[in-house]
Image: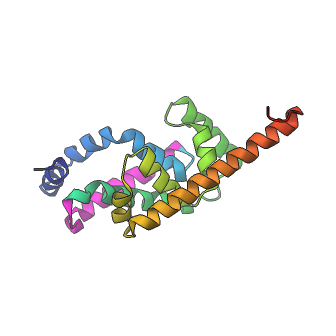
Amino acid sequence: MQPTKKLVRELRRGRWDRLLDWMETKETMLFRLGASRLKRTEDIEDALHNAIVQAVEKIEQLREPAYFETWFIRIYLHECTAVYRRNTSVPMNEAVQSRAAVQEEGFGQVELADMLEPLEPEERDWLLLQYTGGYTYEEIAAAYQTSASAVKSKVHRARAAIRQQEARAYDSQTREKGGSGQ
């Protein structure tokens, strides 16, 4: 039996300690996904807690146990969005302090967050799922109920946008220094 199917079977039997074990193995990826939408560690933890509660309440609604991980991540991302909407009026200095705390705790890189920030939330999520989560286009497409070609297209556009952003930043730095970039 596949590990994911076994995990879902145990969760349906009430073995919620298995969910926590699974989450420990995915801690870095889950935190990075949360940090792509939320800036404060407390908000990320709130979203994760809410996602756990949702998973406990809705585990019976999971149709295909093989997709447990993408199902949980989708719930988690919805919770991140909900927390973000509740907290949109966070003062700027608090957000900056929280970002510094995230960097000090070693959970993520502020540069990565800055690079991903201009992207649409879905593009950010898909890039993070592909590069930090190791998911294929097909797995991401199944989780978001879209086609693999749509995922490929959006990921490609997001990468192109990041390249353009970095090129503009490089050009402005070289102009500030008075150099030609050589």
Examine the image and state in which quarter residue 177 appears. top right
Name the spot of residue 109 as percent of width and height, x first: 56, 36
As rendered, which of 172 and 51 lies closer to the eye?
172
Q: Is residue 145 magenta?
A: no
| Residue 180 screen position, x and y as percent | 85, 35
Residue at the outermost front position: 182
- Pick the residue in front: 106 or 57: 106
Extreme residue toward the right, this view: 178
Colour treatment of the image? rainbow
Q: Residue at x 82, y 36 (%)?
A: 174
Is 47 magenta? The answer is yes
| Residue 128 placement, left or right of 163 | left
Would residue 31 appear left or right of 52 to someone viewing this image?
Answer: right
Compared to residue 26, the image places residue 150 above or below, namely below
Q: 139 or 181: which is nearer to us?
A: 181
Image coordinates for residue 107, horizontal then vertical, percent: 49, 35
In the image, which residues are magenta? Answer: 41-65
Q: Is residue 104 visible?
A: yes
- Overall secondary structure of the magenta section: helix
Q: Is residue 5 left or right of residue 119?
A: left
Quadrant in which the C terminus is drawn: top right
Is residue 82 visible to us here? no
58 over 96 or under it: above or below: below
- Give residue 76's position: percent from left, percent from top: 40, 56
Residue at horizontal 62 percent and vertical 46 percent from the top: 115
Q: Residue at 56% x, 29% y: name it.
A: 104
